[in-house]
Image: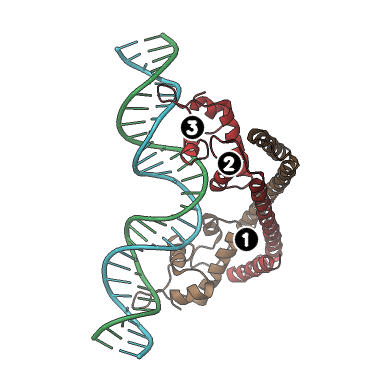
Chain colours: A brown, B red, C cyan, D green
Amino acid sequence: MKIGELARESGLAPSRIRFYERQGLIGSIDRGLNGYRQYSRGTRQVLEIIVMAQQAGFSLDEIRNLLPPHGKGDWSKDRLVAALKTKVAEVEALRRRLSETQAGLEAVIARIEATSPGGDCFENAEGILAGLRDQTKTG
Amino acid sequence: MKIGELARESGLAPSRIRFYERQGLIGSIDRGLNGYRQYSRGTRQVLEIIVMAQQAGFSLDEIRNLLPPHGKGDWSKDRLVAALKTKVAEVEALRRRLSETQAGLEAVIARIEATSPGGDCFENAEGILAGLRDQTKTG
DNA sequence: CTTGACCTTAAAGTTAACTTTAAGGTTATG
DNA sequence: CATAACCTTAAAGTTAACTTTAAGGTCAAG
């Protein structure tokens, strides 16, 4: 399987696949006589794992450290679980912060909609500021 | 008030304040005879508003469009409310996605911890992949 | 009058995760 | 056999939001 085909199947641009190779996320694979990369079916799965991990919020750096050393197919279960748990905690924290942000924004909207139509800039500004500040401190 | 003092009060680096000026987020202000920037108290509030808006997920570009044109102190209330509502919807969507991600990660952790200690790489890999895929599609 | 803490500018550097470009070799098709 | 559609590489460009650097002016203290 050449890179173009892998690209079509995985939905990633060829440049992106080569980039992942340069970054050490996928091993440097076989080449044909012409120098073209020849991929095995497994590579597609590795790519899918990378994309999934990215969606879960892992950086490429983190993913590289989680992926098994090229050649050896062996994840350290403990390391993997630990990393996943850390990431869950991070996601959880981010989620909470977003909830606060959302509540804050909604409060600000309510506040603005309640102002008299002709209110001037800095009255509004300070109201908004106060609203946001309360929310971000409290929430 | 010179830039260093404003920086201390606002907690932002001087370079960051100058950067905001270059980006048109705060107006080009008065200069002393020596060429030093002279800030009024109001600038600090503008900076706080910028930071708050950033925390709410607005990009500097968006903030620039929300902030009143320099000199004129007048927000268009409707434009502001519309932008805030759009942002709330975006935050809401992101929050939902994070919930899914979190559930997915937790499911994957449970799955890994349930595997036999000697499971090999690609069995695990595919299980993880399947778990993540289910979650990201379903959730 | 010199030292150090400020201030000024323009321009270049940083980070992540890629993409684009330039320059060239290969393969399939009419 | 020409032409298009592939493939190769290294290097430079992209974006956001800044920071850092270089080179220099200003100001207060001793």
Q: Is residue B111 left or right of residue B63?
A: right
**Circle 2 or circle 3, nearest the eye:** 2
Give me the chain letter of mark 2: B
Is B51 or B95 nearer to us in this picture?
A: B51
Q: Is residue A85 left or right of residue A9?
A: right
Give me the chain letter of mark 3: B
The residue located at (41%, 25%) in the rendering is B35
Residue occupied by mark 1 = A77
Residue B49 position (above or below residue C6): below
Residue B76 position (above or below residue B101): above
* Residue type for callout 1: Lys
What x and y, as percent, mark residue B130?
A: 65, 70
What x and y, as percent, mark residue A123?
A: 67, 33
Within-10-Å neighbours for mark 1: few <14, some 14–19, many 20+:
many
Residue occupied by mark 2 = B67
Kindly check if marks 1 and 3 are in contact, taking CB atoms under 8 A apart as contact.
Answer: no
Within-10-Å neighbours for mark 3: few <14, some 14–19, many 20+:
some
Residue A41 position (above or below residue C10): below
